[in-house]
Amino acid sequence: MGPGYIDVMPRLYFDANATTPPHPDAVDAVRRAMVEDWANPTSTHREGQRARFRLEEARRELAASLGVAPGELVFCASATEALHLLIRGLHGALGDRPAAVFPGEHSACLNPLRDWSRVSWLPEVPADCATVVQMAASNETGILYPMPSVLDAVRIKDGCQAWGKVPVDLSDCDAAVFSGHKVGGPRGAALLWMRPGLPWEAVMEGPQERRRRGGTEDLPAILGLAAAVRHLTERQAMNAALAPIRDAFETEITSWNRGIEVIGQGQPRLPNTSCVLFRGRNGEALHVALDLAGFAVSTGSACHSGAVKPSHAIMTLGYSSDDARSVLRFSMLPDARPGEVEALAAAIRRLT
């Protein structure tokens, strides 16, 4: 290869559960807002009030897409922040009553639960349980989970992975969080929904967001999210159409008799996600090999990738720590094509 050589090898992206490329309309909305709506929405002058109008317009649009009232939505910078605000605010209001949480939850949820003196793992629910936290869909395995029916407990739904892939029902919960960059929005915008009358205390003081979350709202990111969500129905339909492509991929790789197992196969799952155990193989090494071959995949949750500690979400399903280190997650973008998935399967066969 001579001087000035540039690697132009095409790459295929199979890590949609970590993040997705922003929708072109979201990019345009962010760019326009950076130029036209840069003022502080809290300011009382004309420029600030224009920004406030755009902010509330986006809130109404996003609330309508979720089927909730606009005043019930809080704009946050990330789903991690939303979960911290929600869980820590509930702890202050509910006192020392215990919480019950899905054992495969993301660290964004598990970390604020450290404030609670008593935490049980679902399906165990203490008699005096104050709150229940359940992922609608696992970010690692794609398995879908129903909300437990618990009387007199605040039910929190982590909707980050389910949103835009499968329908998300809010009738069975009292609060929920959603991440913008998982549905083609920009990073920097997330949603916290709380049912009116929730026993919750603000933990981040400030006049913004009806005193529920301090800090100037990131209006360009919020307007970008609103633009992306206008395409949510189409996005969900495209994701639903991935199920037969996913099934064909799983049938192919498990037919080789190489100790390959699909975790959660046969259970209700996200249509774009395959969590695959390559028993006896080093998952990180296979991840690197696929990356060098032009395929972006994940060893699990993006927030845990590269960590030595095996995935707790996999181990809670009964797998060993060695098995958990041998898992790769393949999550397709909504516009994934069969030929791209076939190329991925061929690369896996070559590398295993």
Image: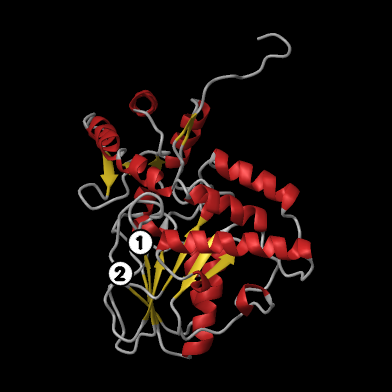
Q: Residue at x 33, y 89 (%)?
A: 128
Is 61 on the left-hand or right-hand side of 170?
A: right
Along the viewing direction, whichever of 303 and 70 lies nearer the viewer: 70
Left or right for 90, reference 40: left
Tell me which corner region of the image, top left, top right, bottom left or bottom right, holds residue 260. top left
x, y (%) of residue 121? 34, 73
- Does residue 187 show up? no
Residue 147 image label = 2
Q: Residue at x 28, y 65 (%)?
A: 146
Query: In the current view of this chain or complex, which residue is farthest to the top?
Result: 2
At label 1, counting other C-alpha atoms closer than 10 Å, the crowd grade (few under 14, some 14-19, many 20 or more) is many
**Residue 48 higher or lower than 276, as above or below:** below
Q: Tell me if 266 is positioned left or right of 100 in this view.
A: left
Which residue, given by chain and number where applicable, does mark 1 sit on? 136
Q: CA distance from mark 2 to mark 1?
A: 7 Å
Residue 2 is at least partly visible in this image:
yes
Q: Quadrant of residue 137?
A: bottom left
